[in-house]
Amino acid sequence: MKLKSLLLSGILAFTSANLIAQNMTDGIFMAKNNFCGGIGYTHDTWNKYWEGTLFRENKNLGNVNTQTITAMGNYGISDRFNVLFMLPYVKTEATKGTLKGMSGVQDLTLALKYRIAQIKNLSVIGSVGGSLPTNNYVADYLPLAIGMQSKTLFTRGILYYTLPHELAITAQGTYTHRSNVRVDREMYFSDQAYFTNEMMMPDVVNFGGKFGHYSYRWQLEATYEQNIVNGDIDIRRNDMPGLCAKMDFTRIGLVAAYRIPQLKDLQIMGTVGQIVAGRNVGKSTTFSISILQYIDLRKNKGGGGIPTGPICRPGDANHTGNMSTDEHKDGHK
C-alpha cells in the first residue's frame, strides 16, 4: 500500500526549482556584462493525491515533504541574449510509514534565452536548453526519489507584453524531450509488461502565464501553469508507480519580489504555488524564497550604461531614455 503512491516528488524536483528561477520562463533579461546570481529555498508538501483521476490519500505516507536548495545564475552576453544555469540540492521525507527519504545534488540545467524581435511593447523570445544528472542517484524510488535520472532537451517560446503603469503579461510554452532511464530491475509494467531495465520516458508539454506589476524595484504577479505528459499510463491500484506514468497538473501561484537599495539592490523573492487539479500527482503546496545579487561586470561602468539598473525590461526599449547601449547601436525602436 505504501508503494502505491505518487510520482510527484520526482517531477517537483524540477518544477519547484522553476518557481525560483523566474528568468527561465519570463521576459526579463540581464543587461550586457551583468550577472545575477543567488540561492533559493523551496518547501513542497502534500498528503492527498490523484491516483489516475481518483483523488485520495495514503495514510502510510503522511505528509510527503520535498525541500530544495538551488544555486542559480543569469549572465547577459548582450541585452537580448542571456545564458542561465540552475543546480538544486534536494531532500525528501515522509512523516509516516517505513519509507526512508533521500537527499543529494540533482540535475544541472543550462539554458540560452534570446529576444528574437521587439514589436512596440511586445517581445518575442526563444529559449533552448537541457538538463543532465550530476550523479547516479536512485530514480526508481518514488515518491521519495530526488529526481528522474533523465537527460532532457527543451525548447521554449515566450511572449512578453508591457502595459501602462508598469504592468506586464507573460505567456510561455515549453516542449521537453526526455531520454529513457535505466533502473535496477529487469522488468516493469506500465501499459503492458516490459522485460527490460530501460524505462521509456514520454515527452512533456508545459505552458503558462503571468500577469501583474513589474518594475525595477518591485514585482508582484499572479501565475498559472499547466503540465501535460504524453501518454495515458496511470498508477494502478496496489501497484508500484513508474517513472513513465502520465503526470499532469494545473498550478496557480503568486510571485513577489523587492530590491533593497540599502543592500546594493539585493533582491528578495518569494513565491507560493498550489496544484489545484492533476492526474497521478499530489495536491501539493509549494513555498519558496530566494536571495539574488546583481554584479556589474562592465569595464566602463560610467559610459552610457543602463539607467534603470542591471536588468533589461524589453518594453522599455520604446522609450529612448531607457534604452541600453546595445539597443542604441542596433537601432531597435
Image: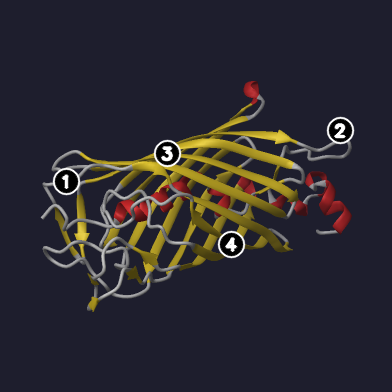
Where's residue 292, x and y in %?
58, 34
* Separation (CA) of disc 4 from disc 3: 23 Å
* 53 in relation to 56, above or below: below
Mark 3 packing: few (<14 Cα in 10 Å), some, or many (20+)?
Answer: many
* 126 in relation to 13, above or below: below
* Separation (CA) of disc 2 from disc 4: 32 Å
Please give the name of the residue rendered at 87% of the width and 35% of the height, measured from the top-left corner.
300
Element on which disc 1 rests: loop
Q: Earlier in the sequence, mark 4 or mark 3?
A: 4
Q: Earlier in the sequence, mark 4 or mark 1?
A: 1
From the viewer's perspective, is the residue at label 3 or at label 1 nearer? 1
Where's residue 169, x and y in %?
56, 56
Element on which disc 3 rests: strand
Q: Which residue is mark 3?
A: 288
Q: Earlier in the sequence, mark 2 or mark 3?
A: 3
Q: Which residue is mark 4?
A: 158
Q: Amino acid at mark 1?
A: Leu
Q: Which residue is mark 2?
A: 302
Q: Amino acid at mark 4?
A: Ile
Please give the name of the residue rendered at 29% of the width and 57% of the height, measured from the top-left corner.
140
Q: Which residue is mark 1?
A: 61
157 or 75: which is nearer to us? 75
Q: Earlier in the sequence, mark 2 or mark 4?
A: 4
